[in-house]
Amino acid sequence: MYKILEKKEIALKEVWYKIHAPHIAKKLKPGQFVIVRAFENGERIPLTPITWNKEEGWITFVVFSRGKTTLRMNLELKEGDYLLNIAGPLGNPAPMKKFGKILAIGMITGIVEVYPIAKAWQEHGNEVISLHITPEPMILLKDEFENAVSNHIIESFPLKEGMGMPEIFMELLSRGTKKVRELIEKEKPDLVFMVGPPAGQRAIFEVVKEYGIPMEVDLHPIMVDGTGMCGACRVHVGEEVKFACVDGPSFNAYEVNWDELIKRSGFYSDLERKAMEMYLQVIQANGGAQ
């Protein structure tokens, strides 16, 4: 059992948690993740710690209300409650070396996963420029980035009435690709790194590829156990099948089979939507109480 030490909403649909998890905090490194099971018989979800303290034994992460499990966590859990299980740290740490100038991009909540890596790269002597591509109500960690990297840039836009996810995503792609092209031509980075939805990563990669700049992407396909046993997170990288949980999560963007990744990422969309609808019906039947 893992106690919730603090919990607060920090942006639209974004809730920050501080969790007592000493065995994870002791070994965690930038780029690694954890698997959380909050409820009995509940779904296991991957989350990336933002900050941690080895001496005090806590980690922090942000939960985006995307599906039933994340919405239930953000609605039902409170400070002093407990998460049932946390497994980790999992995955490979980000390589810590001198690359030179790095453009580190996070689309929407992907910026959360960029933060610990960008901060560590800056501390290793790199010049890190971070870019957050997001709707305005979902701006995250602005102050933290400004204190951690050489330059933090936010490419944001207001959410207008009637905008659905397709319209929001098209705006993200349009603004994101334009801004990345502008920054590449101005800053001439030695490495581009990105975390975000697969279709967004591919759109940014198509721009980066024009300039031949090395690019790494943290991939987050469907994941179940996080230890390489289930095979759900398999991706084709080059001519090989890789598992994002044990071989990644970071991969060379030039070798990723983007068509396959995007197709597999939407495999359970219908079931996820039905699960959310059923959960919302339960809430409504209870008069809005969980």
Image: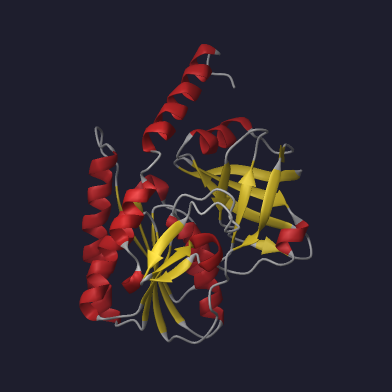
Estimate the x, y position of residue 60 in percent, counting from the top left.
63, 54
Q: Is residue 274 above or below residue 111?
A: above
The residue drawn where x is 52% and y is 70% is: 117
Estimate the x, y position of residue 144 in percent, counting from the top left.
53, 63
Estimate the x, y position of residue 95 in percent, counting from the top left.
53, 78
The residue drawn where x is 49% and y is 16% is: 284
The residue drawn where x is 29% and y is 41% is: 159
Q: Nearer the viewer, residue 33 or 237?
A: 237
Say if residue 155 shows up in the picture.
no
Q: In the drawing, does residue 83 fall left or right of residue 204?
A: right
Q: Is residue 191 above or below residue 76?
A: below
The quadrant in which residue 72 appears is: top right
The residue drawn where x is 47% and y is 68% is: 250
Say if residue 13 shows up in the picture.
yes
Q: Nearer the viewer, residue 164 or 84?
A: 84
Viewport quadrant of the C terminus: top right
Viewport quadrant of the N terminus: top right
